[in-house]
Image: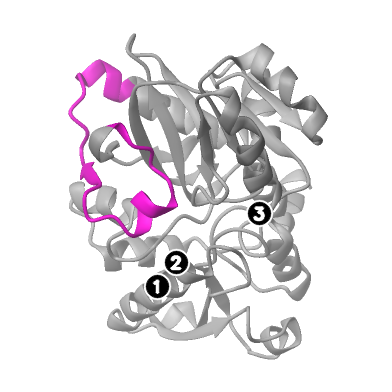
Amino acid sequence: MSAAMGRVGVLYGGVSAEREVSLMSGQGVCKALRSRGVDAHLFDTGERSLAELAGSQFDRVFIALHGRHGEDGTLQGALELLGIPYTGSGPKASAVAMDKVMSKKIWQHAQLPTPGYVVLEHEAQLDKAVQELGFPFIMKPPHEGSTVGFALVESQAQVKAAFALAKQYDRAVLAEQFIAGRELTVPVLGAGKTARALPVIEIVVPEGGLYDYEHKYHSQETQYFCPADLPAAVTKQVQTLAQDAYRALDCEGWGRVDIMLDAQQQPWLLEINTSPGMTPQSLVPMAAQAQQMSYEDLCMEILQHANLKVHTAAAKDE
């Protein structure tokens, strides 16, 4: 099967705020694929051009990029034009998932639970967020990942600074109802009706902190429990919600759905990552390992399903 994969490019690095994580993801994926006999080659999209990618003679690519220009549909659209099969979701699903506001609108339309929110474009609108959401609430840029620009707003004195932080990364800011409870994440593999949820992971930050960039990538105190210690019925409910959220956005290949579980055992959808971290210590490999799937097997499964989504969709309509 490894030979059938042909010449494989592992796209990593990029130019987003998540470049550092992507470099680690790409190196891990490339090493794993090579260990299975795949002719895999690293390709840093932050340092090399689309023209070089077009001339690379890759038979398929594994996208190990996170954030803008890698996870937001732009690269996926370019790969469609170049005719290079790729891992993960297509241009539309990637773009919608990367836009936290649009994701929430689609989930609300599908009657899936997600926290209330207000979109802010100007400082003059801050009072509206306070009035509609009350304290505490979350502020974050709608088009970034890895909690870049993220802040918990607990008082009036913090509102302007939180808005300014998020506004550094986006034209608008998402102010979102804060859901107190247990932080969960659920990786999903596959597409459509065959998409399956991996074991639920619970993320525990010390002393009531938040799972922000520091706790996600630099803290030694953040704890992860996989499978999460939940009643069987709640586990099933959370996994089903993750699958429904994934399908509602028409995602495929793989992804990771972030969920808050409140004190009443009600799960709330926060966001979905269509190209989540893939370092050997990342959360998707952790969930796969809990199901006796090795990191190498996970990478191979994701790569095996690389295809051209737009062409595939057109072919289905014929």
Residue carrying label 1: 24
Q: Quadrant of residue 78?
A: bottom right
76 sits left or right of 302 in the view: right
Kind of element beneath mark 1: helix
Residue at 54% in and 66% down: 65
Marks 1 and 2 close (CB-CB < 8 Å): yes
Q: Amino acid at mark 1?
A: Met
Residue 90 disc label: 3
- Between the C-alphas of marks 1 and 2, the distance is 5 Å
In the image shown, does 147 or 105 lie closer to the viewer? 147
Q: Amino acid at mark 3?
A: Gly
Callout 2 environment at 10 Å: few (<14), some (14 to 19), or many (20+)? many
Residue 226 location, x and y as percent? 21, 41
Kind of element beneath mark 3: loop
Q: Is residue 312 magenta?
A: no
234 sits left or right of 169 in the view: left
Residue 272 location, x and y as percent? 52, 41
